[in-house]
Image: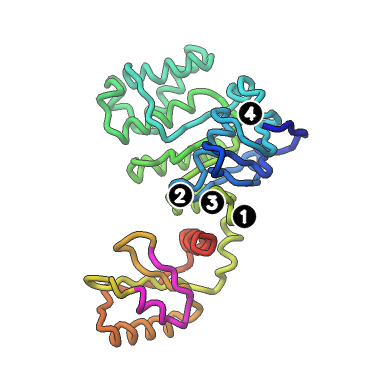
Amino acid sequence: MTAEVFELTSFPIEVRDMKYTYDGRKYAVDGISFSVKEGEVFGMLGRNGAGKTTTIRILSTLLKRSSGFVQVLGMDPSTAGNHIRKRIGVVLQDESFDFTTVEKAFDVYGFIWGVSKGERDAKRESLLKTFELTDVRKKRMWDLSGGQKRRVQVAREFMHDMDVLFLDEPTSGLDPIARRNILNMIKDLTRDGLSVLFTTHNLEEADYLCQRVAIMNNGKILASDTVDALKTGYNGLKTVEVKLSGDQAGAGSMFSKVSSGRVEPPFESGMPYRIVTGNTQETMQEIIKLAASESAQVEWLNVRAVSLEDVFISTIAGGA
């Protein structure tokens, strides 16, 4: 890695033109730039392989970037890893392996971080309750379900104080109540100044939790702004969702003829087509006429406000 000139910034996380390659040929992270403010939840959105996890691994000192400017809490992760790790929390997608009980796992984690016995006990009891783990506190970790293990993995990170928290798909595999508990706890902590870098596939979570987001694809950031600002470009528009009955092999041809709005094909089989339009009545009438002419049957049709998911899909489709 070439020598870089670094300067102290006012952001807990500052990234400029950061690149990383695993094989020396293709960049998994390709020249991205962003910053995270104090007390902010910054979301990184993207499909698998977009570069989100690699970004978190670099910032949390687990990988060394190939090039670019990076600071976490005013320090370079590639040279000040020991100092940074004392002030951050990290929850990765990888499952951790513990051979003790749930309550002991909390205690050991707090001990490692130098938390006093009395404080460990108080925090453990609070976290067990918040994350609904009280009933399994005596169980060994390997006897838990996947969702329960994930809850322990996320919850125990809060046994110690931190300035920056990295969360890589933290709610994956969790039920709606557990997800909401985690999101609410993160919101509460940011009010005390905690800065959070949060990756997720769940666009509703990002909409609920994040002040700003970056949409990534193929190692690049395609769009980045506040959630509200990203939606502003769709002001006054609505989304018409349409699903055809039976075989949709000819759906692409049919929807390509829609002229009253912008068609966004589904990423996955069985998902509805979306048409972003300023005239929902005209669009619905057009779809019904096209379906009749193509001998297709509309299974269901729905109209709703434009969401962050619509922005995400449109951005990825436009930047693919």
Horizontal and vertical percent position of residue 68? 68, 39
Q: In this view, does 160 lie to the left or right of 33?
A: left
Residue marked by disc 4: 77
- Three-letter amino acid code at the position of disc 1: Asp
Q: In front of the other: label 3 or label 1?
A: 3
Residue marked by disc 1: 225
Q: Distance between the residues labelled 4 and 3?
A: 22 Å
Q: Residue at x 28, y 86 (%)?
A: 292
Does dot 3 land on a helix, a strand or a loop? strand
Does dot 2 land on a helix, a strand or a loop? helix
Q: Earlier in the sequence, mark 3 or mark 1?
A: 3
Q: Which of marks 1 and 2 is nearer the N terminus?
A: 2
Q: How is the image coloured?
A: rainbow
Residue marked by disc 2: 205
Q: In front of the other: label 1 or label 4?
A: 4
Which mark, by number, is residue 216? Answer: 3
217 lies above or below 190 = below
Q: Residue at x 40, y 41 (%)?
A: 171
Does dot 4 land on a helix, a strand or a loop? loop
Q: Residue at x 30, y 34 (%)?
A: 146
Give the magenta part as a residue range: 252-266
Q: Which residue is drawn at 48% across and 66% down?
A: 306
Q: How far apart are marks 3 and 2 (CA)?
A: 17 Å
As for residue 254 lying within the magenta part, the answer is yes
Camera-side residue of 21 and 320: 21
Camera-side residue of 227 and 252: 252
- Three-letter amino acid code at the position of disc 2: Glu
Horizontal and vertical percent position of residue 243? 31, 71
- Three-letter amino acid code at the position of disc 4: Pro
Q: Are marks 3 and 1 in contact (CB under 8 Å)?
A: no
Q: Are marks 4 and 3 in contact (CB under 8 Å)?
A: no
Q: Earlier in the sequence, mark 2 or mark 4?
A: 4
